[in-house]
Image (spheres, rainbow, N blue to C red):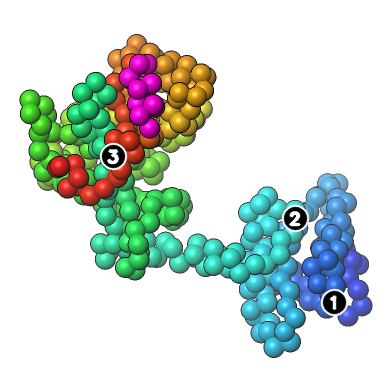
Amino acid sequence: AAARLRRGLRAGDDLGFLDHDRLVVVCETHGGKKAATSLARRLSRSLSEPFRVEEDQVVLTASIGIALTADPATPPEALLDDAEVAMGVATAAGGNRWSFYCPAERAEALNAVTLPAALRRGLAEEQFVLHYQPVVEMGTGRVVGAEALVRWRRGGEALVGPDSFIATAESSGVISALGTWVLRAACHSAARWPAGAGAQAPYVAVNLSAHQLEDPRLTSLVRKTLAESGLAARRLVVEVTESVLMADPEIASRRLGELRHIGVRVAMDDFGTGYSSLAHLKALPLDILKIDRSFVAGLGAERADAAIVEAVVTLARALGLDAIAEGVETPAQADELRNLGCPHAQGYFFGRPGPSSQIDE
């Protein structure tokens, strides 16, 4: 491979190994990005023909990261670092391509390295808080429950939502500790919520990750948390997305069955956007279907969305399940859901996520 790559270089260009599968080319381009792109194209083309190794043919591809500088004082180490960041971008995009370095990618790469440690420090320093979004009964407007949503005040900054850190928490293994904290904080908060006139106190819903669902200690953790907080098991709902449920239906069914056995209810979140089959839906131990906001958004404007929502509500009723519509933002959407017979809903129209005291009020 190195011999082929060398044939694509000019006199004066340098080629060297960084390690077993990474090579570096150092050259003067003069033509900036255009000349560098031309070089990258030649290098990729030089590897396009298969290699013959004994009786086999081997195909190699290259992910190429390119860093340019016009400043002769640029440290070589910095240029190499920038090129490696760009190479990571090319690899993440599927490989067999090239990418130019840009400062935003360095910040993103640095964040990917430092974020797991920052998450662990955030847990130790109690930087996380829970906000709660109410779930209402469509016929009466009564608050019957609330979904716990985690927020992070990183280093004293403004609160940020889970989209900015949950994926890293899952890939780094921090999600188990974070999920345990969410479960305990949510149960202790909900245990203090008052009951309305003639009705039981609202339930609290917490989201489970795939890591938590695979953990055989999950049920004992939930049982211990309920005992410590004094929250009745029927007032805890665990929410799991379709993708998590379908990743391993057997383990999911077993673990969720254990939770239901102790009185905890189970909700399938974002229903309709994943790839579950009706056979799986019938087999899984569920109590609630949450209709994804993408269908609710079109109510009043898209007949197809109304038909889908009505079908899910009818399906839930036939299976003895509750149905909750997510992402309700307008009076028109709420009216349409009432007309379609959806029993429960949540969204900005009823209440934005806020501190536990909001549910008290």
Main secondary structure type of the part rendered in magenta: helix
Q: Where does the image place residue 328, in percent across and percent down from the top left?
A: 37, 32
**Image vertical order of residue 340 relative to residue 120, above or below:** above
Q: Is mark 3 on a helix, strand or loop?
A: loop
Q: Nearer the viewer, residue 138 or 37?
A: 138
Identified by mark 2, the residue type is: Arg
Q: Mark 3 points at which residue?
A: 351
**Which stretch appears magenta?**
330-340
Of pointers 1 and 3, the one earlier in the residue sequence: 1
- Mark 1 and 3 residues: CB-CB less than 8 Å, in contact? no
Q: Mark 1 points at which residue?
A: 30
Of pointers 3 and 2, the one earlier in the residue sequence: 2
Of pointers 1 and 2, the one earlier in the residue sequence: 1
Residue at 67 percent of width and 75 percent of height = 80
Identified by mark 1, the residue type is: His
Q: Where does the image place residue 167, in percent across and percent down from the top left?
A: 45, 50
Residue at 75 percent of width and 55 percent of height = 97
**Image vertical order of residue 170 relative to residue 301, above or below:** below
Identified by mark 3, the residue type is: Gly
Q: Distance between the residues labelled 1 and 2?
A: 22 Å
The disc placed on residue 21 is none
Q: Is residue 336 magenta?
A: yes
Residue at 73 percent of width and 78 percent of height = 69
Q: In which quarter of the image is the N terminus?
A: bottom right
- Disc 1 crowd, CA 10 A, few/some/many (<14, 14-19, 20+): few
Q: Nearer the viewer, mark 1 or mark 2?
A: 1
- Mark 3 and 2 residues: CB-CB less than 8 Å, in contact? no
Q: Is mark 1 on a helix, strand or loop?
A: loop
Q: Mark 2 points at which residue?
A: 97
Q: Which of marks 1 and 3 is in front?
A: 3
Q: Farthest front residue?
A: 331
**Image vertical order of residue 167 relative to residue 137, above or below:** below
